[in-house]
Image (spheres, helix red, strand yellow):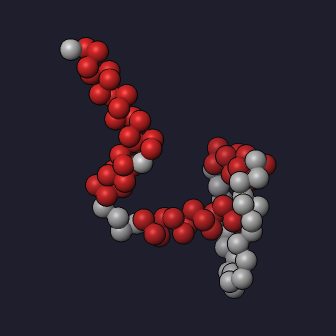
Amino acid sequence: MPAIRGKPKEQISYKCPHDLFQKINTLIDQGKYASRNDLITEALHLFFENQNRVPHDAIKDWLMSDEGEKWMKDLIRAVLKEI
């Protein structure tokens, strides 16, 4: 993913738990993010975009996604096998 550029930035300091640090570095190594800064910036954007969403809406969105639809179909198949 290309670097996020063009907006003035402020510097902050953040101490990250080791397991999250490793996951961040893995995503950067895989080329999904250009830098730790870009990953953290995107995570914060997603957080602020979704902080006012009702959990019900998030669940509904997930169930309507391809992953959620597959999960539901698999669940229904499992229940029908037991009948």
Q: Residue furthest left?
A: 83
The image position of residue 45, as x and y in percent, is 54, 69
- Vertical placement of residue 29 versus 48, above or below: above
The image position of residue 80, as x and y in percent, is 26, 20
- Total tally of numbered discs in the picture: 0
The image position of residue 34, as x and y in percent, is 76, 61
| Quadrant for the C terminus in the image | top left
- Vertical placement of residue 33 versus 6, above or below: above
29, 16: nearer the viewer: 29
| Quadrant for the N terminus in the image | bottom right
The image position of residue 70, as x and y in percent, is 41, 36
Q: Residue furthest bottom?
A: 8
The image quadrant that residue 52 belongs to is bottom left
- Vertical placement of residue 70 versus 44, above or below: above
Name the residue at 57% across, 62% down: 43
Left or right of residue 3, residue 76 in this image: left
Viewer can see residue 39? yes
Name the residue at 39% across, 34% down: 71
Name the residue at 36% across, 49% down: 64
The image quadrant that residue 44 belongs to is bottom right
Name the residue at 71% across, 54% down: 32
Left or right of residue 11, residue 66 in this image: left
Viewer can see residue 36? no
